Image (cartoon, rainbow, N blue to C red):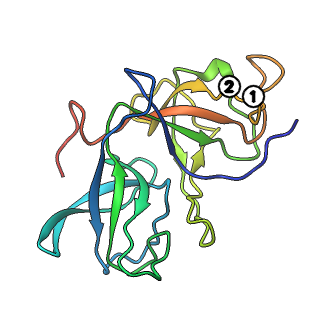
Amino acid sequence: MANINAPFGLRPAQNLGSGAYDAVIRQYSVPASDGTAIYVGDPVKLVGTSQIINGQVFADVAQAATGNVVVGVVVGVLADTRDSLIYRAASTQRVLLVCDDPNAVFEVQQVSGGTPLTANDVGFNVNFVVASGSTVTGASGVTLDNTTEATTNTLDLKIVGVVNRLDNDFGSAVGTGADASRFYVRINRHQYVNQIAGV
């Protein structure tokens, strides 16, 4: 059965050490001066500024691009009114809930088209592709870039497994992938690990 092409960004699924998902969630802010919308499942980076909101201090983040050092992945956006959007609209100040645990493992769909990643790519590093999210569901459009898998240590993510579920067709053999299939990854260039420069 063909996979549905429905990107959702990076979705926390497991912890590298324990298997079960119990990763830490922290609050970060995005200032109104940031003109890029941020969706649930988007990777984010620290920008080196902070804000005081309702008497609390929050470090500022922005949507991460390919090649950035990532601090974590957005898992929610705090509502500030009953009519708040479920994503962070451009040029609005919002507080984001971010999974910033460097041991968190995320589920993500590979980009549709091209030569699919395969089960034999587990252990390789790979970049992500940033695309616009959905203003209806609030979900990210980020996918795995299936043209970048390599041993290169500076790529964004590390593939740690194939999603073994009935709704994920991973191909007819370990060396044969399937379009828009899903993988488990961890952040390879994480802000809170050794040998990463400060912001």
What residue appears at the point 54 percent right and 56 percent down from the top-left corner?
Answer: 130
Nearer to the camera, 114 or 6 = 6
Tag 1: residue type?
A: Phe
Q: Farthest right residue?
A: 1
| Quadrant where the image shows the N terminus | top right
- Mark number, residue 170: 1
Q: Nearer the viewer, mark 1 or mark 2?
A: 2
**Image position, residue 46 (x, y; %):** 26, 56
What residue appears at the point 23 percent right and 38 percent down from the top-left corner?
Answer: 196
Q: Farthest front residue?
A: 82
Answer above or below: position of 84 versus 165: below
Which comes before the other along the chain, label 1 or label 2? 2
What residue appears at the point 57 percent right and 60 percent down from the top-left corner?
Answer: 139
Q: CA distance from mark 1 to mark 2?
A: 8 Å
Answer above or below: position of 131 versus 7: below
Tag 2: residue type?
A: Asn
**Image position, residue 16 (x, y; %):** 41, 24
The reply to whether the C-beta atoms of the residues labelled 1 and 2 are less than 8 Å apart is: yes
What residue appears at the point 55 percent right and 58 percent down from the top-left corner?
Answer: 140
Residue 148 vs residue 116: left or right?
left
Secondary structure found at label 2: loop
Secondary structure found at label 1: loop
Q: Label 1 crowding class (10 Å Cα cut-off): few <14, some 14-19, many 20+? A: many
Answer above or below: position of 27 versus 191: below
**Image position, residue 31 (x, y; %):** 28, 75
Nearer to the camera, 95 or 181 = 95
For disc 2, the marked residue is 164
